[in-house]
Image (cartoon, rainbow, N blue to C red):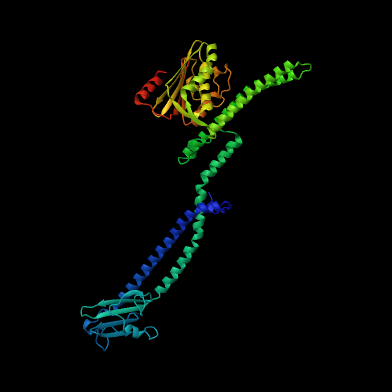
Amino acid sequence: MSFGPVKADVSLARLRAALRYFLVFWLGIAAFLLGLSFFIKDRLRDYDVRDVEERLSVYLAGRPVSGLMDKSGPRGGGGSLQGLAFIRFVKAGEQLLLSESSPEQVDFHRLAGLDSGATGVWISMADPEKTGTWTIVTRTLASGVSVQAGKYTGLSLLYGGVVRLLRLAALGGGLPALALALACVRVGLAPIRRLSADIVAILEEGRTALLLPSEAAGPELADLYRRLNQLLQHNRQLIDEMQASLDNVAHDLRTPMTRLRAVAEYALQPDRKPEKLRDALSDCLEESERVLSMLKIMMSVAEAESGTMHLQKERVDLTSSLADVTALYEYVAEDKNITVENRPQPGLSLQADRTRIAQVWANLLDNSIKYGKEGGWVRISAAVDGDSVVIVFADNGMGISKNEQHRIWERLYRGDRSRSQPGLGLGLNYVRAVVEAHGGTVEVASELHQGSRFSVRLPRIQRESGTESARSRSQIKGA
């Protein structure tokens, strides 16, 4: 992998992503150079101090302490100062200054007024608290004589040059820091680029079953690849379901549209009597109503699922609402010799859209009758359960298999046993959409050939006593 900058790095987004890496690397370089400067400074200062101390020790070696302040000059060992700029002896207000330097090199007036205890590295002769070019070492001998030695050093100037070079290196280090930061961003984006290439390959080859085996992506990306595989499989499932839905819609629309066309062609034949034309128009109207009804239900379901269904909520008496629907399907139930028992707990009310909630009861009752068995029964109950009202539609009809129970809520889904009955496969999907739009839930419990039990739970707007609540729960269990 190349670590040099490439054309893709020259973008605002890439530079923004590299900014934090750049700051880390550049500050790291600056911190390293700063530490290096302190290290060099300490080493140079230590060298200067040791050098002055060693030269002073060589000078003092073999000289009697008592004769150091003899104004005739120091005795023994010769007069060489061992390369020191000056040596100064101070005792009881008297001082002796020895130097081999010229007045241009050493300011003797300042030196004479220098504190006898002054010591330091790279200090100024005028103000020892400030930085200069003198290294001064002071010793106090056993005789009470204070010996002060100093040397003019060029290492302070050398260190100044080193500091300037390190500053330039710190500034120049921004470029390699930026290049390294961009390389880190590029390395970090490598899995994303690989993932993008895999997705492009999948789209081009049409392989939507799997993206990559989880092991191939590495431990860090294994979970991401698994989730993408699940997403692709889910999309494949949605596409299959959409195709099946379109097939169902086309199948259900084909019959009324074929009839509509046949009736229209029949009416267009010459010499048709007026009463025949009126019958044809009536048939056309009936078939168009079927088509419009299906489209209207599909649009209502879409509104409910998207959260845009407009509900005109009002106080609805539950007993009256269920009674109206039961009366509407009374003759349909009689045709199949099915007994409908409507026994809600009295006095229950809901805050609901009267028309849409009635359509929920109608769909559930219609399914119970449609898929019920000859001579069977349908029992409708409603009771309080905590802060909710539970409405139950139970029957002893054909029931629903375990594999189909989670699919009956899908739009346009119709089970194999239900295809023999007229319908669009939208009823239960519409029921769930409307119930959830009211803030409720709907569930199913069913056994094949034993019957089904649909439970609708909706928020209630009034509270009953504890006795009534307990009785209502027993009614729900016994339904």
Q: Residue furthest bottom?
A: 72
Q: In the picture, which quadrant includes the C terminus?
A: top left
Visible residue check, residue 178: yes
Examine the image and state in which quarter residue 62 appears. Answer: bottom left
Observer-nearest residue: 327 or 237? 327
Residue 134 is left or right of residue 412, and the answer is left
Examine the image and state in which quarter residue 427 appears. Answer: top right
Visible residue check, residue 262: no
Observer-nearest residue: 300 or 408? 300
Residue 271 is left or right of residue 123, and the answer is right
Observer-nearest residue: 258 or 264? 264
Measured as percent of width and height from the top left, residue 229 is found at 51, 35
Q: Residue furthest right?
A: 270
Measured as percent of width and height from the top left, residue 345 is found at 42, 21
Observer-nearest residue: 464 or 58? 464
Identify whether 82 is placed above or below 350: below
Identify whether 300 is placed above or below 377: below
Examine the image and state in which quarter residue 276 appears. Answer: top right
Measured as percent of width and height from the top left, residue 153 is found at 38, 76
Q: Residue at x 41, y 66 (%)?
A: 37
Identify whether 229 is placed above or below 28: above
Identify whether 473 is placed above or below 311: above
Measured as percent of width and height from the top left, residue 65 is found at 22, 81
Residue 324 is left or right of residue 206, and the answer is left
Q: How many labels does the image show?
A: 0
Q: Which residue is drawn at 46% across and 22% down?
A: 319
Residue 133 is left or right of residue 226, and the answer is left
